[in-house]
Image (tube, rainbow, N blue to C red):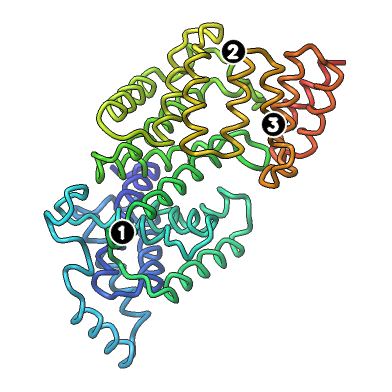
Amino acid sequence: MSGAAEVEGLLRELAPRVLGVLVRRYGQFDLCEDAVQEALLAAAVQWPADGVPERPWGWLVTVASRRMTDQVRGESARRRREEAVATASPADEWVAPGADADLPAAADDTLTLLFLCCHPALSPPSQVALTLRAVGGLTTAQVARAFLVPEATMAQRISRAKQTIKAAGARFAMPPPPERAERLRVVLQVLYLIFNEGYTASSGPDLQRADLTTEAIRLARELHRLLPGDGEVAGLLALLLLTDARRPARSRPDGSLVPLAEQDRSRWDAAAIAEGVALISSALARTPVGPYQLQAAIAAVHDEAARAADTDWPQILVLYELLGRLDPSPVVTLNHAVALAMVRGPRAGLDLLATLDGDARLAGHHRLDAVRAHLLELAGDPAAAREHYRAAARRTTSLPEQRYLEGRAARLG
């Protein structure tokens, strides 16, 4: 294996493990992360040309350790490092084998790094950026491109995130059991945010970013491997697979958006759908129901319909009603309104949608206007629908979505 694409995949897999070794050894996340990034960059340049070393993990650890040594050279830094290593206990690094049945017995640095990068002291954008860099193995330039910001801006965001973690006194260790469920919820949310940014880019000329959706699925798979008994982890992975399965049919060759009802379902990824359905079926049968499981179940109902007309909307409506009680949010209400309209008529959906008019969380968001326009069109009010399609088009920063909404408005006269 020597191609650049194969090397990039291997480096992403090895990045969190190498970083874990360095943080255990030196105890300084910010400096260790910089050293690992330098090692990854060196490998990305050398390996495609010279071939992958016999022990790539060991090569990266050696190079990163040398970079780390260069960074912390000096007597006072050396003493601090030695003291940190000398005073570290196994409990600081990982939960003792057998101490928690929900965690793997063997230490795995990826899970610890995910929890560290999703530290509650960080803002959601910083959690996403740091997760992609430290756990995903992306360079700062790659993360910046993913979010369409200058590399210098992203470098500052990542630097501030690392300094925030340092100031918060965070250690390379699993959070204590009382905090673990909440921290896992944040980890799942961050992976979901990464996926959503890739599935429908929030701005720019492209509808979707396959690099981000692929990375989110890869990290969700790794999390499921580490926590196979967690129903919400399984639910998230199922949701991502079932949603991403439609990606090949979501856009035309010119990049324009194709709505779900109009997609060529023969282009959907049947293997991903089968895997997602199996995952969510198993999770629902053996674990308490959670929000990601319900969303995955909804996605499965959509994906299992051979035609849009075959969609089991009554079942989707019941699932949204459950989701609204379990994890209420404006986005859930938006989707609930669509399901309600498909079962009980567009006016019922519009009535539910009206409850969101004063919700500050949706102020200025294009989706409220877009959904209202769709339901007004179904209700036979083309003039009102046209105005809301145009309002939605003005508010979105995604060019493919903007063109789609403007096209819908134009068709209504």
Residue for badge 3: 401
Q: CA distance from mark 1 to mark 2?
A: 42 Å
In the drawing, what numbered circle is on residue 194?
none
Tag 3 near tag 1, CB within 8 Å: no
Which of labels 3 and 1 is toward the front? 1
Instruction: State the residue in front, 352 or 58.
Output: 352
Instruction: State the residue in front, 114 or 336.
Output: 336
Which residue does the image show at 24% across and 39% down from the upper left?
Answer: 228
Name of the residue lying farthest toward the left: 98
**Dot 1 amino acid type:** Pro
Badge 1 marks a residue whose secondary structure is helix
Whether residue 226 is situated above or below residue 87 in the rendered picture: above
Residue for badge 2: 343
Measured as percent of width and height from the top left, residue 260 is found at 58, 19
Q: Which numbered disc flags the more N-terminal residue, 1 or 2?
A: 1
Whether residue 358 is situated above or below residue 384 in the rendered picture: below
Residue for badge 1: 178
Which residue does the image show at 75% across and 24% down from the upper left?
Answer: 373
Instruction: State the residue in front, 73 or 232.
Output: 232
**Dot 2 amino acid type:** Val
Neighbor class of circle 1 (other Cα within 10 Å; few <14, some 14-19, many 20+) is: few
Q: Is residue 404 left or right of residue 19?
A: right
Badge 2 marks a residue whose secondary structure is helix
